[in-house]
Image (spheres, rainbow, N blue to C red):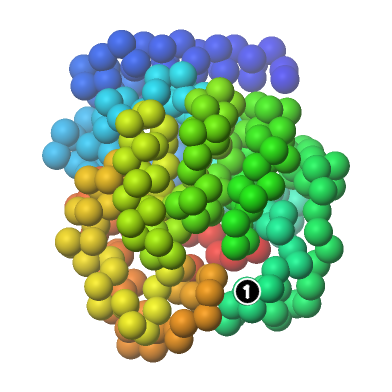
Amino acid sequence: MSIPVRLRAFGIARALDYLERDPDANLPRLMEWVDKFAGEKLSPPYQDLLHRAMTDPDNNWNQLLRSMYTDVDSRVLKKIFENFIIHGGLLDWPRQNREKPFGQGNAPWAVIIDPSFPCAMDCAGCGASIFGVRPSMEFDSLDEEIDSRKAKGCHLFIFSGGNPLAREEEIIALCNKHTDCVFAAFTPPASITQTLRADLLRVANLFPAIQVDLDPEGAVRATEQLKRDKLPFGVACRCTAENAERVATEEYYDRVIESGAKFCWFFTCPAYGAPPSPTAEQLLDLHRRVREFRKTKPLLTLDFWDGPSPSVAAPQGGSI
């Protein structure tokens, strides 16, 4: 890390410390720092998004940011912010995408890794069924994959598959080694054990996405435990022809937000299991609802459409 980069990282760390003392009062002031250090690198839509998120208490992104400070353990929160902003170069992503689009030597903003292949779930639309069975990946292989992508600037890694935390020891070991990265894992509710929660607090750079539709009662238990321990988490919802009218509704969003989740990922493949997929009309209606609620609800939502990002005004990356 060069001296200018070190100085910038030091400034970011100091700004995060400053923000932690009083988020409500200091979040608007932090925008002055963003304008000073990154303003020229941000396009007007991104600048507008950040200004509203940091200065308008009625803005849904402002509410989401402030909820992180009340709901998430301070050490975990600081680690996640540092890894995204300092190591991941969050504020540089718009400039990097303009100057060197993905596929021209630039790293994607996130990489999905499935450590559980071969998988027998045979999901419709899954890459495993389309491209064939990949070999199982042990710790050394996963470690090598992460190292190679970090060298290109990627610091967010998402573990997918039926239950990646079935290999909990390996994933926790990766989190321990790559402390400058953020990891997420899609997982069924049963994986959220006391041992795992203790490890999540200790490594501070891994957060689960609970597969809520697999076991609704178990999901309630798991989210209550994560919320009580002040751990960041999200939920993953498999969209099917049967539930397409019930998910991504205002009632659904409010329940997810009340659970303490900070993000929701809608799988429209469906990404696991074998129920019938939503129809084209159901998918279009679902995506329209997601786009509208991104403007009003304090919840980060993602789906597999190559559509607008959470900012609505900025482009969203496709699949890799």
Residue that label 1 marks: 121
Where is residue 236 drawn, in percent x and y? 43, 58
Q: Is residue 108 visible to us here?
A: no
Q: 204 above or below 156?
A: above
- Tell me which residue sits at (33%, 21%) in the image: 30
The image shows residue 146, relative to residue 248, as above or below, that is above
Relative vertical location of residue 179 with respect to residue 300 in this rendering, above or below: above
Answer left or right for 307 relative to 115. Answer: left
Q: Regarding mark 1 in the picture, which secondary structure is present there?
A: loop
The structure residue drawn at horizontal position 45% and vertical position 52%, both measured from the top left corner, is: 189
Q: Amino acid at mark 1?
A: Met
Image-quadrant location for residue 112: bottom right
Where in the figure is residue 87, as x and y percent of width and height? 61, 29
Quarter in which the N terminus is drawn? top right
Q: Is residue 143 left or right of residue 263?
A: right
In this rendering, the count of numbered labels is 1
**Residue 154 image offset from top left, x and y in percent:** 66, 42
Query: Dividing the image into 4 quarters, which one contains the C terminus?
Result: bottom right
Residue positioned 70% across, 68% down in the render? 119
Q: Quadrant of residue 162?
A: bottom right
The residue depicted at 75 percent of the width and 77 percent of the height is 131
Residue 104 visible in this rendered orientation of the protein: yes
